[in-house]
């Protein structure tokens, strides 16, 4: 199991940078009793290299991902995350290996670099590459030609790989796009016998399924300490007036066409994150591109699916991108420019917003030009609209800093939901909302009008739960030729459908087993030949109750939705765009090494990155939030492509930590993590309020966005749910001194991640142990709102004032003592035990001009503010 980041931050004397970071790390390893107990010798820590660096202006923590080396050759899976504060190391080293010099098999590769690469292609069943030649070498790192992909050379490195039998095998590590560009492989090949030691695909493919049959390549650990391409840039001055573009899009807090209307938005982006606007690349005032291309993203269509250079809309000198979109009933080719514009806009929004919370140049963000602010440039996002290489999907590939990521957005073929009409009995007659399945293969459309009319019969398999269709039916004769009703249960939707089909069902209705919308259903079984739909728990149980009468026949009709449907376009689903971009954020901030943990927190982070943008002042945490309801053509009240909606209401989303043991990897497991982060978000909003200003706000939503990004940096490689929880607590400790310690623990404990919870083996997704115990209150534990420690909730304005002064305290109602004190220390105004409800205006016109102090005191409140009266 990954070693836990613990929470206490020690104070160190400031010694300055008289020693370099590596020497400080070695000193820490040599003197720390816990690390010495792991059996590390001086030889094990003699040759270390920093492969990633991160920092945070909020936590003041510097993170260093460090690998061990043997004779200058990196041990690729020895990454340990060292944390420094006040110029001293206080954590790290738990993941290093001991006695490494005695465990190496050889120092000389039997397979040379091109032989090893050919072997890798063969074992990956990847297309062969002709005439691979060496074009660059730097120590043990190399670059090779990659066939027709001139802009994407093969990166290679000679490494050691620590095996399960405690040996170090010399290997070749390759990172390369396949010739069809569908995979970005990172693979380690044994340099002696050519066997695959490790492989990951950096193309994170998000078909948004939650079934156990879905396969998802893990995110990858980065084997390269620095990217080979390193553009050197001189610092530049900020543009005074970056060019303003005009984009007809769905605003960034509107999820999709089903959630709101398109607007013509005029913007040059955020001045801090995009100082020269969205169409610049060289740091001068004039724009370099009038198409949907700039420093942060190059958006283009890829209708033919070849990852080549596609068409981009041209806004001309006025940068006006105003194109029509006629909805899901017309061919996608009629609105490609509109789709590409929305994709360009949303990528820029994700760049600019999360820049504010620490995903900047120094922390490996995506920019073509880093404007002298650190990091490696040349890695703006390539965003491909209406990608023709697939459907019902989206993906994001994230090479290391300096390598250009690629986002691929697809068209979706799920049509509008069909309708269930109950004809009899009269007590339940009427139309019911249902959700179609997303089986691929195996989807069978509900027939068009007049549809399919049959009796409804409840499935019985004789084994509790007797109606979940996880085993063969005992009442097959009754099911034959009818529409079969099944309760949702432990086995997959495809298994249920096939069991009913085997019993002679002509269609299946699956009843949700929790409150909320009808469940989205994914799966893959090409032998399924009948329609399969779902209904809500409330409606489904009402139908089942009517059947239970025994003397009543329930008869119904299934009919496809009326109207023309061609496809829905993922480019207009801002939630999916944000989710994909979010993979890039979490992958980069973790050092491109999330792949060793099977818990797949990356999927949860990605959902959460979107959810944070769509919050509105009128929202509350108990509402249901689905993901991908437009892409799957569900109503906005649907659950979308997750098992449950995101909600703080346990009746709507019952997930606890133990749920991750039964949820499919990666999306199901990730949605458990996002559920807890969503609870945490609303705990912060309840405590600190909400701000619609996602760039400069200081309210609860802003605070938790900063906290989560800082925690990803602290957590480092191969995180687990438990280390992720501890990283959040550590980030709060570093930033606020632990003002939110109890609140964070309470949120996690209530979802089963209390003090006794454990992730166990990070490679096993079924062994998590939950616990609901909260820690005892400590010195940094503030159970209620402490306004003295959270002074950004108190505001006094205007200041300077002409005599009327307003005091505003968010969410405070009660008794307060108010005093105004002049510069000589005299109390010139007093209001003791005065009633206060959010705000109060004082009339100080009787006082002379000058400087005064306003003192506010009461329960959990002791606040002092200087004011000037004119």
Image: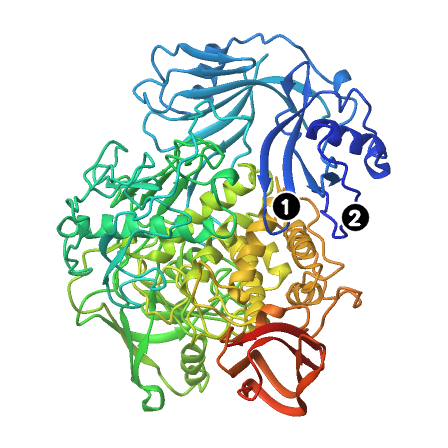
268 horizontally vs 792: left or right: left
Q: Residue at x 79, y 22 (%)?
A: 99
What crowding class fits label 2: few (fewer than 14 Cα within 10 Å), some (14-19), or many (20 or more)?
Answer: few
What crowding class fits label 1: few (fewer than 14 Cα within 10 Å), some (14-19), or many (20 or more)?
Answer: many
Disc with the residue nearer the chain's start (1 vs 2)? 2
* Res 631 visible: yes
Q: Residue at x 65, y 10 (%)?
A: 107
Q: Residue at x 52, y 26 (%)?
A: 226
Label 1: state its secondary structure: helix
Q: Position of residue 40 (x, y in %)?
A: 81, 28
Give the answer, above or below, for where 14 lies relative to 501.
above
Q: Position of residue 687 (x, y in %)?
A: 60, 72
Is 867 or 641 nearer to us in this picture?
867
Q: How is the image coloured?
A: rainbow
Is 368 or 748 nearer to us in this picture?
368
Give the answer, above or below, for where 383 lies relative to 187.
below
Return the mark for residue 349.
Answer: none
Is 200 or 746 nearer to us in this picture?
746
Q: Position of residue 603 (x, y in %)?
A: 49, 50
Q: Residue at x 80, y 42 (%)?
A: 13
Label 2: state its secondary structure: loop
Give the answer, above or below, for where 164 lies relative to 63.
above
Query: What is the C-alpha distance between the residues marked 1 and 2?
Result: 18 Å
Give the answer, above or below, for where 707 lies relative to 316.
below
* Labels 1, 2: front one: 2
Q: What quarter of the picture does the N terminus occupy?
A: top right
Q: Quadrant of residue 642?
A: bottom left
Q: What is the count of numbered marks?
A: 2
Which residue position holds label 1? Answer: 714
377 horizontally vs 589: left or right: left
Which residue position holds label 2? Answer: 11
């Amino acid at each position: 199991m990954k070693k836990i980041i613990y929470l206490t931050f020690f104070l160190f004397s400031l010694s300055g940078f008289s020693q370099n970071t590596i020497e400080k790390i070695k000193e820490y390893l040599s003197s720390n009793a816990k690390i010495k107990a792991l059996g590390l010798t001086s030889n094990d820590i003699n040759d270390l290299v920093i492969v990633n660096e991160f920092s945070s202006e909020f936590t003041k923590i510097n993170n260093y991902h460090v690998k061990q080396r043997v004779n200058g050759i990196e041990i690729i899976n020895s990454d340990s995350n060292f944390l420094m504060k006040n110029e001293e190391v206080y954590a790290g080293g738990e993941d290093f290996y001991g006695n490494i010099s005695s465990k190496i098999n050889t120092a000389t590769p039997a397979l040379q670099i091109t032989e090893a690469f050919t072997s890798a292609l063969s074992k990956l069943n990847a297309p062969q590459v002709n005439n691979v030649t060496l074009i660059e070498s730097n120590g043990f790192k190399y670059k090779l030609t990659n066939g027709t992909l001139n802009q994407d050379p093969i990166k290679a490195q000679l490494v050691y790989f620590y095996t399960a039998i405690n040996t170090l095998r010399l290997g070749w590590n390759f990172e390369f796009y396949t010739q069809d560009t569908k995979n970005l492989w990172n693979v380690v090949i044994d340099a002696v016998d050519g066997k695959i030691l490790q492989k990951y695909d950096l193309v994170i493919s998000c078909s948004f399924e939650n079934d156990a049959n879905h396969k998802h390549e893990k995110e990858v650990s980065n084997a390269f300490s620095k990217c080979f391409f390193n553009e050197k840039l001189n610092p530049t001055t900020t543009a005074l007036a970056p060019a303003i573009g005009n984009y007809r899009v769905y605003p960034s807090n509107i999820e999709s066409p089903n959630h709101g209307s398109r607007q013509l938005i005029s913007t040059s982006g955020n001045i801090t994150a995009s100082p020269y606007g969205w169409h610049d690349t060289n740091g001068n005032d004039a724009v370099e591109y009038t198409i949907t291309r700039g420093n942060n993203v190059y958006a283009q269509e890829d209708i033919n699916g070849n990852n080549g250079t596609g068409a981009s809309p041209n806004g001309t000198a006025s940068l006006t991108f105003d194109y029509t979109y006629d909805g899901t009933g017309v061919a996608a080719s009629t609105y490609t420019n509109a789709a590409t514009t929305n994709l360009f806009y949303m990528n820029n929004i994700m760049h600019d917003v999360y820049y504010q919370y620490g995903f900047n140049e120094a922390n490996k963000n995506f920019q073509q030009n880093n404007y002298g602010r650190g990091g490696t440039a040349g890695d703006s996002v390539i965003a491909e609209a209406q990608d023709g290489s697939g459907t019902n999907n989206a993906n994001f590939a994230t090479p290391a800093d300096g390598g250009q990521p690629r986002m691929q957005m697809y068209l979706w073929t799920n049509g509008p939901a069909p309708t269930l009409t109950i004809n009899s009995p009269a007590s339940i007659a009427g139309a019911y909302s249902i959700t179609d399945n997303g089986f691929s293969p195996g989807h069978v459309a509900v027939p068009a009008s007049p549809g399919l009319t049959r009796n409804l019969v409840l499935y019985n398999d004789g084994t509790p739960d007797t109606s979940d269709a996880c085993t063969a039916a005992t009442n097959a004769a009754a099911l034959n030729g009818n529409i079969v009703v099944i309760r949702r249960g432990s086995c997959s939707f495809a298994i249920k459908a096939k069991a009913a089909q085997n019993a002679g069902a002509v269609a299946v209705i699956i009843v949700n087993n929790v409150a909320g919308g009808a469940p989205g259903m994914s799966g893959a079984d090409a032998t399924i030949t009948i329609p399969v739909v779902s209904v809500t728990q409330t409606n489904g149980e009402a139908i089942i109750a009517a059947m239970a009468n025994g003397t009543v026949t329930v008869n119904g009709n299934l009919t496809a939705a009326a109207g023309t449907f061609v496809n829905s376009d993922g480019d207009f689903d801002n939630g999916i765009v944000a989710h994909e971009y979010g993979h890039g954020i979490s992958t980069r901030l973790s050092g491109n090494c999330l792949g060793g943990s099977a818990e797949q927190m990356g999927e949860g982070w990605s959902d959460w990155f979107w959810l944070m943008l769509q919050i509105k002042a009128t929202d509350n945490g108990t509402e249901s939030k689905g993901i991908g309801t437009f892409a799957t053509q569900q109503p906005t009240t649907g659950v979308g492509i997750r098992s449950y909606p995101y909600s703080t209401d346990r009746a709507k989303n019952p997930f606890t930590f133990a749920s991750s043991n039964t949820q499919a990897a990666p999306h199901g497991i990730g949605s458990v993590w996002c559920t807890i982060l969503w609870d945490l978000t609303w705990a912060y909003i309840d405590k600190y309020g909400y701000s619609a200003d996602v760039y400069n706000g200081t309210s609860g939503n802003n605070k938790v966005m900063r906290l989560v990004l800082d925690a990803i940096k602290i957590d480092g490689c191969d995180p687990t749910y438990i280390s992720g929880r501890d990283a959040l607590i550590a980030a709060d400790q570093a930033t606020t001194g632990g003002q939110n310690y109890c609140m964070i623990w309470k949120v996690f404990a209530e979802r089963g991640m209390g003090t006794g919870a454990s992730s166990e083996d990070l490679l096993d997704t079924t062994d998590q142990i939950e616990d609901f115990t909260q820690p005892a209150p400590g010195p940094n534990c503030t159970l209620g709102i402490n306004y003295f420690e959270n002074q950004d909730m108190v505001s006094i304005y205007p200041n300077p004032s002409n005599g009327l002064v307003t005091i505003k305290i968010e969410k405070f109602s009660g008794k307060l003592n108010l005093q105004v004190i002049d510069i000589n220390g005299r109390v010139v105004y007093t209001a003791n035990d005065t009633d206060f409800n959010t705000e109060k205006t004082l009339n100080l016109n009787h006082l002379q001009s000058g400087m005064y102090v306003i003192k506010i005191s009461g329960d959990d409140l002791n606040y002092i503010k200087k004011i000037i009266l004119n």
